[in-house]
Image (cartoon, rainbow, N blue to C red):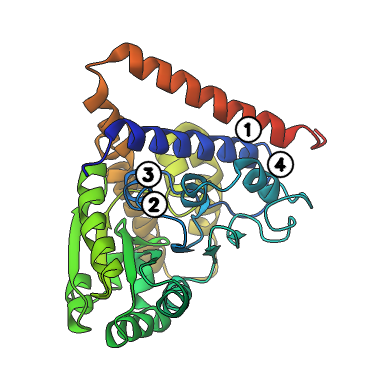
Amino acid sequence: MPPDLWSLYALMLKSRLFEEVIAKLWHDGLISGEMHLGTGEEAIIAGVVAQLREGDAMALDHRGSAALLIRGVDPVLILREMLGCPDGLCGGMGGHMHLFSKEHLAASSGIVGAEGPTAAGFAIAAQYSNPGAVAVAFFGDGAMNQGMLMESMNLASVWNLPVLFVCKDDGWAITTQSANMTGGNLNERARGLGIPAVEVDGRDVFAVWAAANAAIERARSGQGPTFLKARCVHFEGHFLGFQLIRIARDPLREMPDIALPLTKSFLRLTGATMRERIAGLKTVMASVLSTLRDPRRDPINDPVPRTRASLQSDPERLRALEDQIEKDVSDVAAYALAEVPS
């Protein structure tokens, strides 16, 4: 059955608006610590998770809120968890990187690559107790350099486990471009372990849905794992408040905080040689200029408006859908904040 683009867009928009609420709460100081959002991943998450059914499992990385929301976890509980409330999803003890829902067979972890062993464990359990069920692992391209993920993919291949390994490839491993730290081709790595590999445009929810559909059906029928590499863009960088992105968005406001210490360091009478200082300054400026040209700043890479453009032939239906989703997310935020002191 072909996907319903209206339903997929609704899921994508809901997760985007929900994460915008999270971002505002974080900027307002109501959520502490680092905050990693999946802004830019919506087509990947919706295209995969919308196809899961009862008994299927998800192993999530530190950007798990959208997948949990689409899977049906109560968004109020997710927000209350991030706010550190004892009535949150995990008793206020897990924060945004360690979200769990036993009811939905969903677990997230802040440990890079941990999604592999978790998904393999879910899949082994499915083979014994729930044949036909699948497990999905979501992780970034940087996780492909973690031994436990590669070991899990090897195990899934040898034991023919029903796992879909979804690599959300944004070209960055935290703040390092993946090309500078990852050797070879990730698809070939998977194929070298005997796992079929498929690459899609992660901004295209139709393409993701089609590739995931084939992989999930393959796993359900006992044919083993698939590696799905979906290219995407994280518009906020690795985490909210990523300094280079802040500089690119508002240089007049952000640069003084950097320029003053750089100038003091450059003019110090002791320390590195002038040649070393000039080299360091060039590195900093090159990073800033690179961010100005970064695809994270290009709206064409945003999957939400790209999907929306395909629905504009029915503007009234589109407006009604968006108004309803905005209201629903607003109501969730208001309810979650009802007992939180200002």
**Disc 2 versus disc 1: nearer the observer:** 2
Dot 1 lies on which element? helix
Viewer-nearest residue: 253 or 133 = 133
Q: Earlier in the sequence, mark 4 or mark 2?
A: 4
Q: Are marks 2 and 1 in contact (CB under 8 Å)?
A: no
Q: CA distance from mark 2 to mark 3?
A: 10 Å
Q: Amino acid at mark 4?
A: Leu
Q: CA distance from mark 4 to mark 2?
A: 29 Å
Q: Amino acid at mark 1?
A: Val
Residue 281 visible in image: yes
Viewer-nearest residue: 120 or 197 = 120
The quadrant of the rendering that contains the N terminus is: top left
Q: Which mark is drawn over residue 49?
A: 2
Q: Residue at x 18, y 83 (%)?
A: 192
Q: CA distance from mark 4 to mark 3?
A: 24 Å
Q: Which residue is mark 4?
A: 30
Q: Which mark is drawn over residue 332?
A: 1
Q: Which residue is mark 3?
A: 42
Dot 2 lies on which element? helix
3 lies above or below 171? above
**Disc 1 versus disc 4: nearer the observer:** 1
248 lies above or below 158? above
Q: Earlier in the sequence, mark 1 or mark 3?
A: 3
**Image position of 192 (left or right of 242):** left
Dot 3 lies on which element? helix
Q: Amino acid at mark 2?
A: Val
Q: Residue at x 27, y 40 (%)?
A: 301
Dot 4 lies on which element? loop
Q: Which quadrant would residue 103 be assigned to in this image?
A: bottom right
**Image position of 59 (left or right of 134):** right
Q: Residues within 10 Å of mark 3 (few under 14, many from 20)?
A: many
Q: Residue at x 41, y 38 (%)?
A: 11
